[in-house]
Amino acid sequence: MEKQSAIMETSFWVLGHRIDVLSYLFRFFNLFVPEEVRSEVLAPDLRYPQRVYGYQEMFTILEDEGLLSVRNPARPLPQFHDGEASAIALAQEMNWWLLINEQRALTFARQHNIKAVTVPEFVVYLYDAHILSYNSASSKLDAIASNTGHYVMQVARQALLAAQNRDER
């Protein structure tokens, strides 16, 4: 299977790291981020400016190794925050996949025919591809439920259950 190019938004990066699925992305995608997403991911915590979180360290390592490249859109969208606006605009300009987890931005992207994947959808895909077990996929969904839109989670849980039912036949 040929790798596809994908633009990643901050929420996908942070939540994907939290449930340990980012490493699987490199099987399927060549990853790009706009400068705004890079800045959001690497921004210091204002309360603890000396801290470096694991998702920040991993980002820096992958960028240094050339596995994560910065690419900017010609013109970011006027709506959404900077990272979302740039990621959506770049995915649209390049006709690349968009890796995003914010409900409002996801809805906008899909209404504009942008191929988009959320973290929960990616987890279900990994189960469907027999990379994750059902229990692992279900646990990962549970771990991000409070940071993901209800509708996105509901669809993912239904898809995971349907995939499990297919596997049991």
Image: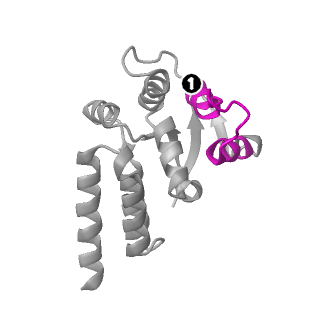
Q: How is the image coloured?
A: one colour
Q: Is 89 situated above or below 155?
A: above
Compared across the picture, whether 68 is left or right of 158 comes to right
Q: Nearer the viewer, residue 83 or 54?
A: 54
Can the viewer see residue 2? no
- Does residue 92 lie above or below 7 as drawn? above
Magenta span: 35-61
Q: Percent position (x, y) of residue 164?
A: 29, 75
Percent x, y for residue 49? Answer: 69, 30
Q: Residue at x 27, y 35 (%)?
A: 107
Q: Residue furthest front?
A: 47
Q: How many marks?
A: 1
Determine the residue positioned at 29% across, 30% down.
Answer: 108
Q: What residue lies at 45% left-to-right and 32% top-to-bottom?
A: 91
- Does the image show residue 107? yes
Residue 148 or 105: which is nearer the viewer?
Answer: 148
Q: Which residue is mark 1?
A: 36
Give the position of the C terminus as an image quadrant: bottom left
Q: Residues within 10 Å of mark 1 (few under 14, many from 20)?
A: many
Taking depth in this image into account, of 12 and 65 the one nearest to the observer is 12
Q: Residue furthest right?
A: 64
The picture places residue 129, in percent across and down from the top left corner, at 42, 70
- Kind of residue sitting beneath label 1: Glu
Q: Is residue 110 left or right of residue 117?
A: left
Give left or right: position of 156 versus 123.
Answer: left
Q: Is residue 53 magenta?
A: yes
Image height check: is 145 above or below 102? below
Does the magenta segment cover residue 90? no
SS label for mark 1? helix
Q: Position of residue 157 (x, y in %)?
A: 27, 61
Q: Residue at x 37, y 54 (%)?
A: 120
Kindly indicate the quadrant of the structure image that contains residue 141. bottom left
